Image (cartoon, rainbow, N blue to C red):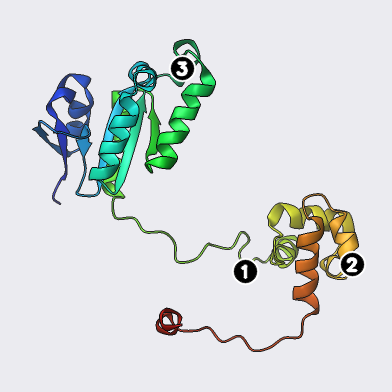
Amino acid sequence: MIPARVVVDEREKASGVPDELTKLNVRVYFSRLPVADYVLNPEIAIERKSVTDLVSSVYDSRLFDQAARISAAYAKPFLLVEGDSKEVGSLARNLKSYYGAIANVSIAYGLRVLYTANPKETALAISELLVHARAKPLSRMPSEVPRKAKSTPLQQVYLVSSLPGVGRRLAERLLSKYGTPRRVMSLTPGELAMTGGIGWKRAEKVKEVLDSKYSRYVESSPQSRLEG
């Protein structure tokens, strides 16, 4: 098996992370990188910061410049924060402005934020990013409760949770209050809305699904959706 490879900025040599990566069978290549500290592939790059450096970079604006440059160069940029996050409270001049800055770079530049405790954890995080670099989202979300669950209570929860806007927790709450799925299905919108977390809009949608006459659903093809 070919070892995973990562390009590391020369200035990261003393951090201990490259040594830990080598122990994880990751092949490390050093280079003077103009952007980022670790480049995993043409799409993924990581800017590593200690907690102290991160807080400092918020107030001297380096963080915003680095976020802009790494997001311009890579489709999936990461900010990896290494150290004890509890130190932020004593280092930041103002926690609101600090977290505002993190929120800004995360949203404005699509920066994904990872937290690790030490170089060993940082190397492990990078190693796993390399493993999952080509991961794709699920084509559909798995059901909260297995369709073929043999337990009657689980089947009841699954049945009620299939109603629009009703997840597992709400389903359990409704069943606890009204006893059976049949009783839940027979509730008026007003009765449904009396259950915390449902409200009138959701209750009306449930009523619409339960009372509307069925008409055969035909899924359009991807091509017809594109042409439409």
Res 144 → quadrant? bottom right
User: In this view of the protein, which residue sits in the foreground, 98 or 19?
Assistant: 98
Q: Which residue lies furthest to the top in this view?
A: 90
User: In this view of the protein, which residue sits in the foreground, 25 or 196?
Assistant: 196
Give whichever of discs 1 and 2 has the lower sequence position. 1
Q: Position of residue 40 (x, y in %)?
A: 21, 43
| Kind of residue indicated by mark 1 | Arg
The residue drawn where x is 71% and y is 60% is 166
Give whichever of discs 3 and 1 has the lower sequence position. 3
| Disc marking residue 88 | 3
* Crowding near the residue tagged with mark 3, few <14, some 14–19, many ≥20 C-alpha atoms within 10 Å: some
User: In this view of the protein, which residue sits in the foreground, 8 or 124?
Assistant: 8
Labels 3 & 1 near each other (Cβ < 8 A): no
Pointer 2 residue: 188
Q: Is residue 105 above or below residue 75?
A: above
Q: How far apart are marks 2 and 3 (CA)?
A: 51 Å
Give whichever of discs 2 and 3 has the lower sequence position. 3
Query: Image check: 223 left or right of 147?
Result: left
| Kind of residue indicated by mark 3 | Val
Pointer 1 residue: 147
Labels 2 & 3 near each other (Cβ < 8 A): no
User: In this view of the protein, which residue sits in the foreground, 36 or 131?
Assistant: 36
Q: Is residue 187 above or below residue 31?
A: below
| Disc marking residue 50 | none
Q: Position of residue 192 (x, y in %)?
A: 85, 60
Total marks placed: 3
Q: Position of residue 68 (x, y in %)?
A: 30, 37
| Kind of residue indicated by mark 2 | Thr
* SS type, badge 3: helix
Query: Image check: 70 left or right of 227?
Result: left
Res 56 → quadrant? top left
* SS type, badge 2: loop
